[in-house]
Image: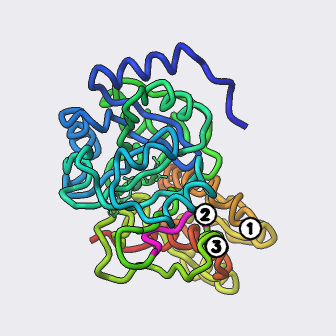
Amino acid sequence: MYPTIQSDAIDRAVDTLNEGGLVAIPTETVYGLAADADNEEAVLKIFAVKGRPTNHPLIVHVADIEAIDAWAKDVPETAYRLARAFWPGPLTLVLPRAERCGTFVTGGQDSVAIRCPSHPWIRELLTRFAGTTHRGVTAPSANTFGQISPTCARHVADDLGDKVDFILDGGACDVGVESTIVNLSGEHPEILRHGAVTRAMLEAVLQMPVPDAGSNAPRASGRLKSHYAPNTKLELVSQERLTARCQELADSRLAVMGSHGILPDLGVNVVFRTPSPETPEAYARVLYARLHELDDIQADRILIELPPETPEWAAVNDRLGRAAADKA
Ligand code: TXA
Ligand code: MG
């Protein structure tokens, strides 16, 4: 699991945030690029470092459920129910924004995304940082806009390096894909982004349907078609087609992730092969690290065997689909 918390490292992270600096933080989903959510100048640095448009809203990470009322207003009962069931954990709630929350955090929108992460290092950091006023940190994934999200400190260092004031190394992320986002600022709850908290889990707590958001949903950069993308062209292939597709591409150097049983028989043009994890949790945990590895081979093309299309695989299939989409 996670390494033992290093108290002096947490101190340094808190000091850096207090000074208006940027800290890469470990969470159970992916590493985030954090700034004091009350400090406009610090938050604006996040957009500059990521190369992310400033109208893309950020998530406010908080220490506990009590912080909801500091950052949001007109909070529906459903929010507390979901927070009690899944916090700390990989669930983000979109709620009407309280005065406290600057529009520099929300991309100018009147709603704010709030999440209470469970990774022990970030929990310790947030508890020390929160004070009596429920201070929080805004943190998008700690990667350049449109690139693969980081799930270990080295990914952050490779991508952002000295643009970050401090990287808090809390080991590899356990969940591996970004939090589930539920919009509670409209009439009915709806899913803005799939993650480890599945639709079935949300519906079991709320006892009502929680559909995907329609096309008029609030802006969410994770909803852009091409996102989380490697630089090498990536193609998704069904299990039945994988062997034949590798043969069709005989003139190309391929990096392949697929079923354990198929890999050994693929041709010599397959220069790198790695087995697909067999459960959605295991797959999500390593997905971004594998995409980084497959990309680093600098093959002509990456082929990934499509996982099953059942509901438990929604988050994994969503990220794979975006990683394979043509860059606009
Ligand atoms: O697991 C996670 O959520 C990670 C870790 C670091 O906590 N964070 C993350 O942040 O994925 P980011 O910025 O890469 O994605 C946040 C998503 C974006 O798609 C953003 O548009 C959406 O949350 N979002 C933030 N505020 C919103 C709002 N007010 N309404 C709708 N979507 C919002
Ligand atoms: Mg991101």
User: What residue type is disc 1 on?
Assistant: Leu
Please give the residue where the numbered disc 3 appears in the rendered image.
313
Q: Which residues are magenta?
A: 189-197
Residue shown at 35% from the left, 25% from the top: 17
Foreground residue among 79 and 146: 79
Exactly how many numbered labels are in the figure?
A: 3
Residue shown at 33% from the left, 34% from the top: 35
Please give the residue where the numbered disc 2 appears in the rendered image.
197
Q: Is residue 154 above or below residue 107?
A: above
In space, the residues marked 2 and 3 are separated at their CA atoms by 11 Å
In space, the residues marked 3 and 1 are separated at their CA atoms by 22 Å
Foreground residue among 213 and 253: 213
Residue shown at 28% from the left, 67% from the top: 219
N-terminal-most mark, 3 or 1: 1
Res 281 quadrant in image: bottom right
N-terminal-most mark, 2 or 1: 2
On whether residue 247 falls in the magenta region, the answer is no
Inspect this view and state whether residue 252 appears: no
Give the percent coordinates (x, y) of residue 27: 54, 42
Looking at the image, do the residues carrying marks 2 and 3 touch, with CB atoms under 8 Å apart? no
Give the percent coordinates (x, y) of residue 295: 49, 54
Of discs 3 and 1, which sits in the foreground? 3
Res 267 quadrant in image: bottom right
Residue shown at 32% from the left, 33% from the top: 36
